[in-house]
Image: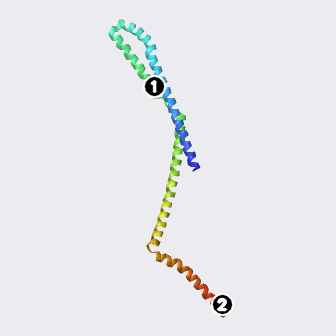
Amino acid sequence: MESLVRTLRVIWRAELLIIEAKMQIAVRRIGAVAFAGLIVMFGLGMLNLAGFFALERIWGPVNAALGIAAADFLVALLLVLWASRLSGGRELALAQEVRDAGLEELEAKAERVQDEFETLREELSALRKGLTSVAKSPLDGAVASLLVPLLTALVKSMSGRKKPSE
């Protein structure tokens, strides 16, 4: 029972480590996306203005605005894709390995307990069959329990009679 509790504690701690690692990844992703949004809002604002004025002379005001907007969307998309590819690293992999090992040990213990219950069930079934047979014919049980002491006493009395006659 103590090893079962220890195994459950190991699994619980591994799950907490996995959750913590995933939370750190989520925080980093959110930070990266927020930073991308900040760049889109402020940094590109000035670049947009400068690009617009430069392209306005070549493309005209409408096409210059469309070109700057397309470049802004492309930069934002690249930053979001980069943020989505962040991984948990070695800590997450290690925590998952510990959790999996704990679960395997727990499954093995559960199988052993199931085998013990199966053995106990078979023993109880055999006992029930024995009690059922005694209950169905109590005379057989009584004869067997009376016959053995009666025969023992008879053998002792016969062996006791032979000694004095010698």
Residue in view at x 43 percent, y 14 percent: 44
Q: Which residue is mark 2?
A: 163
Quarter of the figure with residue 41: top left
Residue in view at x 46 percent, y 17 percent: 38
Q: Is 124 rendered above or below residue 144?
A: above
* Crowding near the residue tagged with mark 2, few <14, some 14–19, many ≥20 C-alpha atoms within 10 Å: few
State the residue in front, 136 or 101.
136
* Crowding near the residue tagged with mark 1, few <14, some 14–19, many ≥20 C-alpha atoms within 10 Å: few
Q: Which residue is mark 1?
A: 82
For the residues marked 2 and 1, what is the alpha-carbon distance in whole angstroms? 107 Å
Residue in view at x 49 percent, y 75 percent: 141
Image position, residue 135 (x, y; %): 45, 71
Q: Nearer the viewer, mark 2 or mark 1?
A: 2
Image position, residue 146 (x, y; %): 53, 79
Q: Is residue 150 left or right of residue 77?
A: right
Q: Amino acid at mark 2?
A: Lys
Image position, residue 5 (x, y; %): 56, 46
Indicate which disc, 2 or 1, sits on the residue closer to the N terminus.
Answer: 1
Q: Amino acid at mark 1?
A: Trp
